[in-house]
Image (cartoon, rainbow, N blue to C red):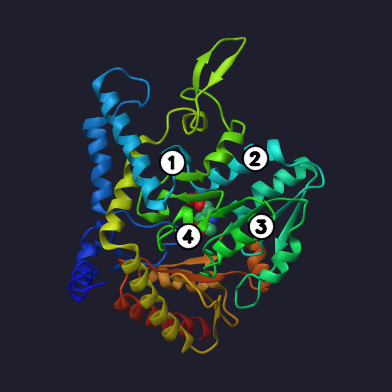
């Protein structure tokens, strides 16, 4: 990068200016300025996304893919353009590899149901890891119960990294699919998914990647990762709730049976026989979250204007800063110390329940997540009731971390008194 380009990128990334795009960050909570450190649960929305939704309902609302009238046709074009924006963002080969869903959870359920129906039989095995979100455990657990198949689990180290040698040992001719999280929502660990995929592919085993926590922070490229399925949610990357994506390689989508059927999925219907559309329409039954899909593309344009590399670098600075400051607090233990981490920091304080800390922080205007973070098997590994989790976005600041660390110290003192 030339010196000039570097300066231009830096100049683009003005956190105080970015914060002005997020109206909610101006509000107070319990009489204090809101400090929002629960971005792993959901991110706040910039004006650009909010405006797109208002614009949709005030001037564009119509159903898609079915109207001859202009309103319907225009919004169909906008929705399909959103699909192309998403395709380009993740480097998918074809736009029909991008399927709109309600979010990561639905995307995973989709694959577990459709893939499971056709490809999983009694005695087969599915591999997940110990650090999965419940959304990437339960659909597979349920499938295994239904099909008399077996769920195998890749163990982790205490620092929160996958034991890759153990993973290799689990793979066998019985393995039908590997389902793995890209970035852990509880530990922040960035898993080596590219290696995990290539190890599975060497044995012709497909891999689904849960990208719920990676998409807002990392640049992902489907050609480079080579994952067979990749899932993510709009609301964790500055887009509206209720919309998400299932990316599936064309070759797999062609082989999958229908997930849900209904309006929008067919070419012709009669009581004798129904002829279905190809992907993606075959997989998108019923009226979708139209404004959500459009909002998702607007959110991607928004973050791409800053550059995901710049966002990742800044968020890493926040993570390093917070890790240093929190580590200095007596009796505080960070859970998840992997070498590669995204901007998530989980911790416990000896003798204090995470919930008590969460409540005292809330009283000081600071929103963090407490509990098991939908990863109960993972917190069981650490033999803890849960953690306090601060997860940062590129609109957060070091000053907010200072306030948070002071509030932590005050809270601990108050509980210990
Ligand atoms: N996977 C991971 C790693 C997550 O962090 C989450 C949500 O926190 C999910 C899956 C489920 O996402 P959603 O609730 O948007 O479907």
**Residue 101 visible, this orientation:** no
Q: Which residue was labeled with disc 4?
A: 213
Q: Is residue 380 above or below residue 150?
A: below
Q: Check whether the beta carbons of the residues at disc 3 and disc 2 lie within 8 A of each other.
A: no
Q: Which sits in the foreground, 34 or 138?
A: 138
Q: Picture coordinates of residue 255 (x, y %)?
A: 61, 35
Does label 1 or label 2 sit earlier along the sequence? 1
Q: CA distance from mark 3 to mark 1?
A: 24 Å
Q: CA distance from mark 2 to mark 4?
A: 23 Å
Depth check, mark 4 against mark 3: the one in front is: 3
Q: CA distance from mark 1 to mark 2?
A: 20 Å
Q: Which residue was labeled with disc 1?
A: 94
Q: Which residue was labeled with disc 2?
A: 115
Does label 1 or label 4 sit earlier along the sequence? 1
Q: CA distance from mark 1 to mark 4?
A: 23 Å
Q: Which mark is residue 202?
A: 3
What crowding class fits label 4: few (fewer than 14 Cα within 10 Å), some (14-19), or many (20 or more)? many
What crowding class fits label 1: few (fewer than 14 Cα within 10 Å), some (14-19), or many (20 or more)? some
Q: CA distance from mark 4 to mark 3?
A: 27 Å
Dot 1 falls on a residue whose secondary structure is: loop
Which residue is at 19% across, 65% downward? 17
Q: Check whether the beta carbons of the residues at disc 4 and disc 3 lie within 8 A of each other.
A: no
């Amino acid at each position: 990068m030339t010196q000039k380009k570097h300066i231009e990128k830096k100049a683009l990334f003005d956190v105080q200016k970015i914060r002005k795009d997020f109206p909610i960050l101006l509000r107070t909570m319990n009489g204090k300025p809101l400090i929002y450190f629960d971005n792993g649960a959901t991110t706040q929305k910039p004006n650009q996304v909010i405006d797109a939704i208002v614009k949709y309902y005030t001037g564009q609302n119509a159903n898609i893919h079915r109207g001859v009238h202009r309103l319907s046709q225009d919004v169909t074009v906008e929705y399909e353009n959103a699909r192309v924006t998403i395709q380009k963002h993740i480097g998918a080969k074809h736009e029909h590899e991008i399927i709109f869903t309600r979010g990561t959870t639905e995307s995973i359920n989709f694959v577990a149901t459709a893939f499971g129906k056709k490809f999983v039989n009694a005695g087969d095995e599915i591999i997940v890891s110990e650090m999965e979100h419940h959304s990437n455990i339960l659909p597979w657990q349920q499938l295994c119960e239904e099909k008399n198949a077996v769920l195998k689990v890749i163990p982790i180290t205490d620092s929160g990294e996958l034991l890759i040698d153990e993973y290799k040992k689990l793979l066998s001719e019985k393995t039908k699919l590997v389902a793995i999280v890209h970035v852990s929502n509880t530990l922040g660990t960035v898993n080596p998914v590219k290696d995990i995929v290539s190890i599975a592919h060497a044995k012709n085993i497909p891999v689904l990647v849960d990208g719920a926590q990676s998409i807002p922070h990392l640049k992902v490229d489907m050609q480079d990762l080579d994952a067979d399925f990749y899932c993510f949610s709009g609301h964790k990357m500055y887009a509206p709730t209720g919309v998400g994506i299932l990316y599936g390689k064309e070759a797999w989508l062609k082989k999958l049976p229908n997930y849900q059927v209904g309006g929008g999925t067919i070419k012709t219907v009669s009581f004798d026989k129904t002829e279905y559309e190809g992907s993606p329409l075959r997989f998108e039954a019923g009226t979708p979250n139209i404004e959500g899909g459009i909002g998702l593309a607007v959110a991607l344009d928004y973050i791409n204007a800053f550059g995901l590399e710049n966002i990742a670098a800044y968020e890493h600075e926040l993570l390093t800063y917070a890790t240093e400051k929190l580590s200095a607090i007596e009796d505080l233990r960070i859970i998840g110390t992997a070498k590669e981490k995204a901007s998530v920091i989980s911790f416990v304080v000896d003798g204090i329940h995470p919930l008590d800390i969460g409540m005292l922080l809330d009283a000081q205007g600071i929103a963090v997540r407490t509990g098991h973070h939908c990863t109960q098997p993972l917190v069981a590994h650490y033999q803890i009731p849960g953690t306090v989790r601060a997860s940062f976005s590129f609109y957060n600041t070091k000053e907010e971390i200072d306030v948070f660390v002071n509030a932590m110290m005050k809270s601990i003192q108050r509980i210990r008194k």
